[in-house]
Image (spheres, rainbow, N blue to C red):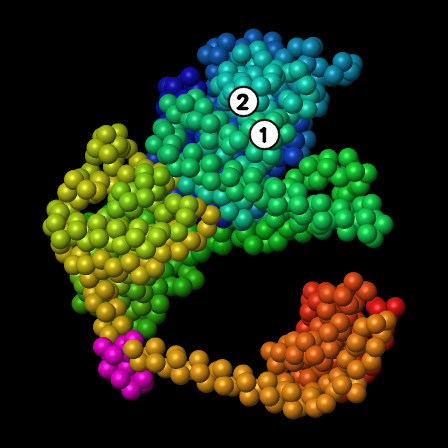
Amino acid sequence: MFLEFFESKGHLAMKSFSLVPHNDNSLLLINSGMAPLKPYFTGQEIPPRNRMTTCQKCIRTGDIENVGKTARHGTFFEMLGNFSFGDYFKTEAIQWSWEFLTEVVGLEADRLYPSIYLEDDEAFEIWNKVIGIAPERIFRLGKEDNFWEHGAGPCGPCSEIYYDRGEKYGCGEAGCTVGCECDRYMEVWNNVFTQFENDGHGNYVELKQKNIDTGMGLERLAVVVQEVDSIFDIDTVKALLNRVAELAHTEYKKDINVDVSLRLITDHVRSCTFMISDGIMPSNEGRGYVLRRLLRRAARHGRLLGIEGKFLADLSQTVIELSKDGYPELEEKNAMILKVLVQEEDKFNKTIDQGLAILSDLEDDMRSRNETVLTGNEAFKLYDTYGFPLDLTLEILEEKNFGVDKEGFKAAMQKQRETARNARKTSNYMGADVTVYQSIDPTLSTEFVGYQNLICTSAITALTAETELVEALTDGEIGTIITSQTVFYGTMGGQQGDVGSIVSENGEFKVEDTIHLQGGKIGHVGKMVKGMFQTGDEVTLKVSEKNRQNIGKNHSATHLLQKALRVVLGNHVEQAGSLVEGDRLRFDFTHFSALTPEDIKNVENLVNEKIKSSLPVNTEVMTLEDAKKSGAMALFGEKYGDSVRVVKMGDFSTELCGGTHIENTSAIGNFKILSEAGIAAGVRRIEALTGDGLMHYYEETERELHEAAKTAKTTPSSLTSKIESLLEEIKALHSENEKLKSKLAKDSLGNVMDQVKEVNGVKVLVTKVMDVDMNGLRTLGDQLKDKLGESVIVIASIQGDKVNLMASVTDDAQKKGAHAGNLLKAIAALVDGGGGGRPNMAQAGGKNPAGVDECLAKAVEVVNEQLN
């Protein structure tokens, strides 16, 4: 209804953008309807239409600790929005919001109350004179409530609309009205009037292009229309909550604590399902950490409810069924979503058991120190490393009369947040440093004509030096050239940009990289090697044919590789990133265990088989719907327009792809996997070579083989047997060397039996030797232990400016109190060292040979104390 209403008002309806922000470092996740549209608000890009409307999936985790505890907090929601980029302003925005709520949705006008920013008289006049709302029903609120700004950048006043849900939701106070913290007056609409520019220091100037950004939570409006208590009671969300209750063999609204867990699991599973569908994978940082945290909170509350076994994938299937019509990517990525959830829940089940064991050890430590409060750092480590929420730690410890330093926990949490915040660039509104490219006229764009051609003629539309727009580039200068047309492919989708040259009668420019800029511009980055170019010049653009061909071979090979991985490993394999260059390719994919040598061989063989089959590589532009019907694979989390390019290799591989390719798979030559490794949880990486890159690899390998054979004084064919022979020789020499070292150590020790003393029935030997390494000390200790029987042995060795300490304690001596680790801890500082170990054996190192005698004297004291 919302989208159709605003389409009738001339708005372009767009599908939801991915939850992963594009070119915006200020956000981990898309958290509002306007967030993906920032470049249109700033004027850095020209929007497809000056009026747009969306239903945007969003995630906000600022109130994550309250999710479940209240009936209104959630992390996932859908935001309905209508946007104007320099087109209509306050009058239309207010009129249409009122028209939609009263005439289309049918809400009673006398239950709706507008609010405005306290200084916004213009908005007051519209509500009062145009809409006809009585002055006493229009509420003026302060900057905190009704002024939208985000540091430096566009900002402005807001006008919200509240719905009176009735006295039963009120607090009962006499002054209860709009702005009260109770649940009676619910905000259902927020018009943001972006009319100022904030310089970051509280100075505001009027924007030339004023914008409208409307936010209206779909779930909130559903609460009002369906006349239910909360977002967890609306039909779609309740269907999922009922499934959670069914798995837990319980009912909603029978037990407060049970309700908390039911709501939390319901919300978090929705968030996780949508996040994974957009290509986010669990990890220990960034948005992957947000996903992992939500998953683990949900899994933990499942345990509290007594749900047996893994259950997140089951619930996710319900989310997919409920939402797949509006978000078809959920159905497309079904197998992957469920696989990630099963793996992550399994991993958490193991870590939570590990965490419980560690918490038990911490309890024992507190008892031994007669302490009753767990430190904040230890509680945070349990939370951060083992996914143990603070409330779980509190709950377990309270049962045993222990407490937790909550303030210390908060301080550790704050420190981590600050570290994460500092690691993320947030220099301005878009969260990225402003570059020279933001100064280019946003109406300029570049047409790519390089799929079939490697040469074209075009006019220069803009020139930049490294830090500023310029009218000319001269000999030796580094800069960027933008033209109206180009044959140079810009870096995108993992494919490295083209290199080559731009020439005219007036000069020559070496293109070292090609990049995509905002607003559909393509930048040729490089250096003027001679002459001069000026804006408006006609130039000839020439792509390096050899480099383009090599990139094409590697790019086509990645398509064959992806399909081969799905054939060999299963359909859960999805592309998670790639890099295609002229000399190599790298392919990241979702899979949950290392590939076996047999897997790698099978994948490699299948790719090479398809190369030898000389499959034709055909490309076709079609609608996204037709592309999906043809079986084309889409990139994980990628957003596509209505028209897409489909690359088909025989009947083997069909993918959506905007990159450049060869015309027949036979041109690839051969394919070789160099390595396969894990790079993140559930993500593997393959590095491989084709064509010229593979030939260079074989040539280099052959050169190294001959070099190694030459060094070993043999031939390449005899190198293996020669190495085996040398290893046998080294083994024999090593054995002989160890015997000599043992003899020298014994000789250095001399006759020490007269140094042996007896303490409480235990023989004690404390002595020093010269130039014996740690291995030698351990060997000496074993020999002396055999000789002395029940004993404590401490030996110090001086090796140049280093000291080695070793302590050995027999079982009987341990029973009488001797402890090798504690002994060395007590004496190592006297030689400026440190170390320790087990009760029966310990070693330490030091840097002060002058302290050895004092150290050994102290050892005698400590042994006497331990044994008495």
* Residue 855 rendering spot, x and y as whole percentages: 79, 80
What residue type is disc 2 on? Leu
The image shows residue 479, relative to residue 388, as above or below, that is: below
Q: Is residue 95 visible?
A: no
From the viewer's perspective, is 808 left or right of 58?
Answer: right
In the picture, which quadrant includes the N terminus? top left
Task: Name the one closer to the observer, 746 or 59.
Answer: 746
Marks 2/1: CA–CA distance: 9 Å
Q: Which mark is residue 42?
A: none
Q: Would you say residue 719 sits in the magenta stretch?
A: yes
* Location of mark 1 (residue): 302
Q: Residues within 10 Å of mark 1 (few under 14, many from 20)?
A: many
644 lies left or right of 519: left
Question: Which residue corresponds to the image point at 68% horizontal and 84% vertical from the top-left?
Answer: 797
Residue 85 falls in which quadrant of the image? Answer: top left
Taking 298 as reference, is 138 above or below it?
above
Q: Is residue 720 above or below residue 45?
A: below
Among numbered discs 2 and 1, the one appearing first in the sequence? 2
On the image, the x and y values in percent for residue 117 come to 63, 29
User: What amino acid type should be assigned to the residue bearing mark 1?
Assistant: Gly
Identify the image quadrant of the C terminus.
bottom right
Q: Which residues are magenta?
A: 703-720
- Up-down relation of residue 271 to residue 657 (above or below): above
Q: Nearer the viewer, residue 308 or 330?
A: 308
